[in-house]
Image: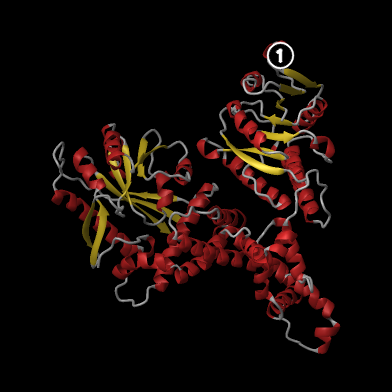
Amino acid sequence: MKTACIIPHYNHPKTVLSVAERAKQYLDTVWIVDDGSNAEPENFEERAAALGVRLIRHNRNQGKGAALRTAAAELEKAGFDYMIVIDADGQHNPDELPRFTALLEENNDCVIVGCRDFDSVEVPGSSRFGRKFSNFWYWLETGVRCGDTQSGFRAYPVKPFSQLQLHCVRYNFEIEILVKLVWAGYKLLEVPISVTYEKRITHFHPWKDNFRLSLLHSYLVTRHLLPIPHRKLVRQEDKHYREILRHPLQFIKKLLNEDATPGGLALSAAVGTFLAVLPLIGVHMLVILYLCIKLRLNKVMALAIQNLFMPPLSPFLCIQLGYFLRHGHWWTDFSMKTCIYEMHHRVLEWLLGSLVLAPLWAVLIYGIVYALAALFQRKKEESAPNLSAKRGNWIGIGFFKVLLFCGGYRLSLFCAWIVTWFYAVFDRTAHKAALPYLTLRFPQDGTKKKHFHRLIYELAKGLIISYRSGLGRKIPIREEGREFLQEDRGQILVLAHFGCWQSAMTLLGTPGHTANIMARPDKNGNLDKFLALGGDRQFRVISTEGFAGGILDAADALERQETVIIMGDRAVDGAPAITVPFLSGELELPLSPWQLAARCGKPVIPVLVFLQKKPLQLILRYSKPIVLPSAGDRKPKTEDLKTGAIAYAKILEHAVQEQPYAFFRFGNEKN
């Protein structure tokens, strides 16, 4: 493979040459395409020539797409096979170029996209949303998933630039070329890359460029769904027919496992539902199958779910609703005239009603199928603990985030209420774990199903409120007992899995003071995302899987007069615990907060987060500090530790009497 590095440049005088110099360490051919810059380094041509970098100039600014097309035309003349594009603003790290060249050595006929790690840097929420939104449209247009369609760090084959019909010349070009390369038969490969987001200069115009992107996505989706084949530049051998003839059972198994994640199955069911409700008389199955092939959905699920909406019930409900929308009252005159001679009116009413009911039923079916599929997947993983978790959870979370953004808080709660009923009915593992607490709190009730549903629903509500805050729609907060805090002298805040405790993480810090959170290592970065909502508050995570369970690091933080935050209501397996009276039974609590308080002589301040419905607000309640006798270097007395734990359990008792479904307790209770 003959490969060059291309750096499109437009007004990045401080970084372009340093990027080129570092890229030159890995590739012999490095070109800068100056797209009509009016701000460039001093002695630009001489310094570029001294580095051995070729400089190509545009007389006026034509756009990034035009710069890439100019570079591709010159590279094709010079006999190059691939070009690796890296931005000139210093956002990308040229030291990661070998990742691209290594993939190119092993793969032919591919396009490579560098997926940026947004979890490691401070990235604006608009950029995160923009990437996810763009990824979604790309999937609709190609049926292929890409983790970062907006990344500018890519490796392109050179020849297709002159073989494909490309129309865009600005930022929208990067989407157009990526889609059309996949249409042409090129494989999409991804490589993880780092990203630097500090002091970044961008020439992206939100209104103009978003308008161009909207027009482009509309065209690409429409073109992809048309039954017109795309021009293939790379021929992939089609083995489907041979598989059917030689191994029919294997082919059926492949169909059943196609995108069989909870999110994939739920989306397939939703698409099948939406199309089944529409008045596509006689062609429902063909349309559903066609769209599933185009979008690479699970065909079996989509075709199976349509049977729930077969005539006469679904069309009758749609016609009734459409009739009501047209005339203001329900259709009750069932005669030869209204059913046969006015059939064209009934079809119109069917269409009107289906446009309302189809999206509602699709959302409902999505939630039901996702809940069931996630439950079955978890059961399977529990029976095979070494099996790695599959992709899918992020789709469910993303669904509720989109629902919040588009439909609002109340619609999200309604969907959560429906979905949690399926967990209440089918999730025996969670029900068994919650049963000890429900038995203590509701000893008179024989069945706990309705209580379990309320418990799970309140948990879902807390998560939705946290996601709502992440979208910038924070609810009012009222603090009670804040006078008990003493940030300047060091303190231990003990949280519980009570109410909207996720949101409380970002509220406990105080600007100018560091808060240390004791938690297990977060491999998915979810805790970091929550803490990022704290704005200018400073947080540090102390791993509980480190030496001595993180107690020594927490003690050092207290010595520095900092705050330490601990979850104090659940005992972790293998960690020291203490059993205390709770309601009519007993409760097992972790010992670490009380050991830390006794050794360091610091107060323990219990914190609980209550959700008030009318008006909607969070109540952050600090209780009076629990002070234990200071043990110093001696071993703390067991009775002193138990005294503190009992006092904390009393506070939890009062809280669950006030809001019984806000205490998310699973296991460790003793009757």
Within 10 Å of disc 1 (Cα), the crowding (few <14, some 14-19, many 20+) is: some
Q: Quadrant of the N terminus?
A: top right
Q: Residue at x 49, y 53 (%)?
A: 389
Query: Viewed as shown, does residue 551 lie left or right of 326?
Result: left
Q: Is residue 481 visible?
A: no
Residue in front for this viewpoint, 476 or 101: 101
Secondary structure at badge 1 equals helix
Q: Position of residue 25 (x, y in %)?
A: 62, 20
Query: Viewed as shown, does residue 334 lie left or right of 459?
Result: right
Q: Position of residue 654 (x, y in %)?
A: 28, 61
Please identify the residue farthest to the bottom as the structure is shown.
335
Q: In the rendered image of this protein, does residue 237 appear above or below residue 72?
A: below
Query: Viewed as shown, does residue 335 lie left or right of 104?
Result: right
Q: Position of residue 313 (x, y in %)?
A: 68, 80
Q: In the rendered image of this protein, does residue 73 appear above or below residue 621?
A: above
Q: In the rendered image of this protein, does residue 535 appear above or below residue 475?
A: above
Q: Position of residue 302 (x, y in %)?
A: 67, 66
Residue in front for this viewpoint, 261 or 234: 234
Q: Quadrant of the C terminus?
A: bottom left
Q: Residue at x 56, y 63 (%)?
A: 370
Q: In the rendered image of this protein, does residue 367 appear above or below residue 561?
A: below
Query: Viewed as shown, does residue 109 lie left or right of 199?
Result: right
Q: Which residue is mark 1?
A: 44
Q: Is residue 110 visible?
A: yes
